[in-house]
Image (cartoon, helix red, strand yellow):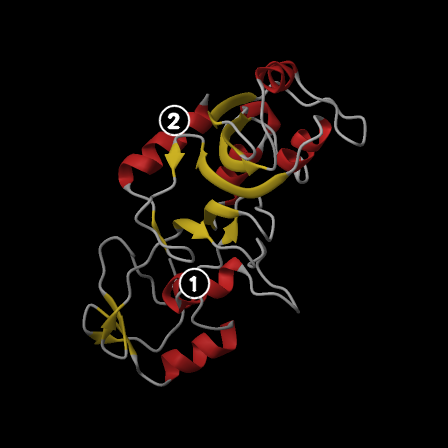
């Protein structure tokens, strides 16, 4: 790989900016100053430094975030804070994007990556990747609702959902539930409960495929996926 391409891919600037960086003599490959952008580098074997700091090259980045309310699942927005705004610069330079979306007022598990192929597989209706949510409902959830969700409910636009697995955790004036679905229609969880005359007052995604929300992550925090989590993801999307 050309050194200028590597630096550009990692977000160190435009072609011109990378060219200027190299000309200034601050880039080294194996302790040798490199000024020619055509110089070849093996990211897996060679040591590249910029102003004395080692650059760890990664083609792809895979992050798990505990998304807070009030932040939108987008790469940029003129009015609201986005999940990308929550990233450290060292991660943002890889230009990750959210895999799917969580509503502005929904919390929980959000995956971010710059691996378009994996993102497509996770979101593909053909893969039936399950997503599980914890929700608080404004009234009692009944076994009739469980059966209705298992059969598929009709949304406000006439669409009949695929079967969803509804589990009642606590029933009463307000009910705690878990719901697993394999689709990602707009506001789907909220609209499914509206279809049975109920309202979601709190919503949190707790899993996506084999990936469980890391409960040690505070709202707004994130971390890279572990090797085991990546292996599980690839196995789930290979089916």
The residue at which mark 2 appears reads as: 235
The residue at which mark 1 appears reads as: 87
Q: Residue furthest front?
A: 173
Residue drawn where x is 39% and y is 30% of the image: 210
Compared across the picture, whether 7 is left or right of 172 comes to left
Compared across the picture, whether 91 is left or right of 198 comes to left
Identify the secondary structure beneath mark 1: loop
Asked if residue 199 is positioned above or below residue 41 in the image, the reply reads above
Asked if residue 168 is positioned above or below residue 59 in the image, the reply reads above
Identify the secondary structure beneath mark 2: helix
Between 35 and 218, the residue placed more toward the observer is: 218
Between 36 and 182, the residue placed more toward the observer is: 182
- Spot occupied by residue 55 in the image (x, y as percentages of width and height): 28, 66
Residue drawn where x is 64% and y is 13% of the image: 151
Between 134 and 201, the residue placed more toward the observer is: 201
- Spot occupied by residue 102 in the image (x, y as percentages of width and height): 57, 46
- Spot occupied by residue 203 in the image (x, y as percentages of width and height): 54, 42
Task: Tell me if mark 1 has few (under 14), some (14-19) or many (20+) residues whose alpha carbon lies within 10 angstroms of its own.
Answer: some
Q: Count the labels in the image.
A: 2
Q: Quadrant of the N terminus?
A: bottom left
Q: Residue furthest bottom?
A: 24
- Spot occupied by residue 173 in the image (x, y as percentages of width and height): 56, 33
Determine the CA span between mark 1 and mark 2.
27 Å
Dot 1 or dot 2: first in sequence order is 1
Residue drawn where x is 35% and y is 54% of the image: 58
């Amino acid at each position: 790989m050309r050194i200028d391409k590597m630096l550009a891919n990692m977000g160190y600037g435009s072609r011109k900016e990378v060219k200027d960086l190299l000309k200034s003599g601050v880039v080294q490959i194996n302790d040798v100053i490199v000024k020619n952008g055509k110089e070849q580098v093996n990211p897996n074997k060679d040591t590249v430094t910029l102003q004395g700091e080692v650059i760890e090259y990664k083609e792809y980045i895979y992050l798990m975030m505990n998304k807070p309310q009030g932040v939108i699942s987008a790469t940029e927005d003129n009015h609201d804070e986005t999940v990308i705004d929550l990233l450290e610069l060292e991660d943002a330079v890889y230009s990750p994007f959210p895999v799917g979306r969580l509503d502005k007022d929904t919390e929980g598990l959000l995956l971010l990556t710059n691996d378009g192929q994996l993102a497509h597989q996770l979101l593909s209706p053909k893969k039936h990747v399950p997503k599980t949510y914890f929700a608080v409902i404004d009234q009692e959830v009944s076994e009739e609702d469980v059966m209705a969700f298992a059969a598929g409910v009709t949304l406000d636009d006439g669409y009949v959902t695929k079967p969803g697995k509804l589990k009642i955790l606590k029933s009463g004036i307000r009910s705690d539930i878990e719901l697993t679905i394999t689709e990602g229609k707009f506001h789907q969880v909220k609209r499914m409960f509206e279809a049975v005359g109920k309202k979601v007052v709190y919503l949190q995604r707790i899993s996506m495929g084999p990936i469980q929300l890391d409960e040690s992550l505070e709202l707004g925090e994130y971390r890279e996926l572990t090797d085991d989590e990546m292996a599980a993801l690839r196995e789930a999307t290979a089916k």
